[in-house]
Image: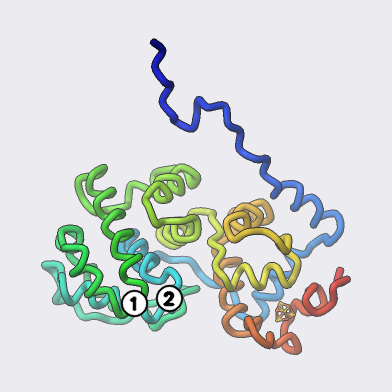
Amino acid sequence: MTQARPRTGVRTGRRRPPDPSPAWRRRLDRYRPGLVDDTLAAMRSMYGVPSWQRVHDPTSELILTILSQNSADINAERAFDALRTRWPSQASDTPATKVNRPGWGGLGIGQAPPPDWTAVAGASPSELIEVIRPGGLAPQKAPTIHAALHRIHAERGDFSLEFLGEMEPRAALDWLMSIPGIGRKTASVVLLFSFGMPLMPVDRHVERVSKRIGLLPPKATALQAHDYWLALLEPGRAHEAHVNLITHGRQTCHALRPACQRCTIASRCRFVDRRAP
Ligand code: SF4
């Protein structure tokens, strides 16, 4: 009797669909040359050049980003602070000066040490849900937080994600995305802001602005948008592009009634003129 071959996803012969992002880049280069550079220059003229520096340790960045999924950043901060209050780490007497990072939409979280991740990982699901309830969608986020902490500890023996900084970006993305509930955007945020990896997180602001200008195909999914953007960008520009496009989406290119009259990329924006160069 022959045994069934294990379904590893490698031996099945299934092919990934071809990546359309290189063809899209060639198309933009041909028909709308300089659009990426012009967009980044326009954003720069409005918002300056954000400087990268690590603000949170990678585990805190991951948990904070999970808490911000489909919630306002300020609510994610409340939930993160609630974790620290309920499960303080031993060294929590550090003054809680607020720190923020470029692209984050809240007020910043206190610079006090992170929560005691051992205690958070060991909490009952119902208690964790109650503690993070101020952040919204707690019943969905609590299992993701537990899955992430348990996975890190099972593989590393502690709760540090510093090892990701030694990996290639694609491998680090895959590692994070293998945790249930962690998608491409969350994983890209952690790796960009914790390690400066050349990855482009695409949230609703980045996606909206990019599609309006015509930098992304109108029907690209949020997941595909990550690959399109990576094909368009020189690696060293991901942080600037991500932060400034988010800022543009929040301050100027609003979902309703974008302020096109004061937008410096208006002459090249397909939302303003569908034949814009
Ligand atoms: S011109 Fe208007 S729609 Fe286009 S990017 Fe600027 S604000 Fe957004």
Query: SS at mark 2?
Result: loop
Query: Image point 31% across, 64% down: which residue?
Result: 60
Q: Earlier in the sequence, mark 1 or mark 2?
A: 2
Q: x, y percentage for residue 142? A: 29, 64
Q: Quadrant of the N terminus?
A: top left
Kind of residue at disc 1: Gly
Q: Residues within 10 Å of mark 2 (few under 14, many from 20)?
A: some
The Cα–Cα distance between marks 1 and 2, rounded to whole angstroms, is: 7 Å
Mark 1 sits near ligand 1, with its Cβ under 8 Å away: no
Give the number of the disc on residue 135: 1
Q: Residue at x 59, y 85 (%)?
A: 251
Is the Cβ of the residue at disc 1 closer than 8 Å to that at disc 2?
A: yes
Q: Residue at x 63, y 81 (%)?
A: 255
Give the crowd class for mark 1: few <14, some 14-19, many >=20 residues within 10 Å: many
Count of numbered badges drawn on the protein: 2
| Residue 37, label in figure | none
- In the image, residue 175 above or below residue 271: above
Q: Is residue 276 left or right of residue 13?
A: right
Q: Is residue 135 left or right of residue 91?
A: right
Position in image of residue 11 (x %, y %): 50, 25
Reading the image, the residue beneath label 2 is 71
Residue 270 location in percent, x, y?
80, 72
Residue at disc 1, secondary structure: helix
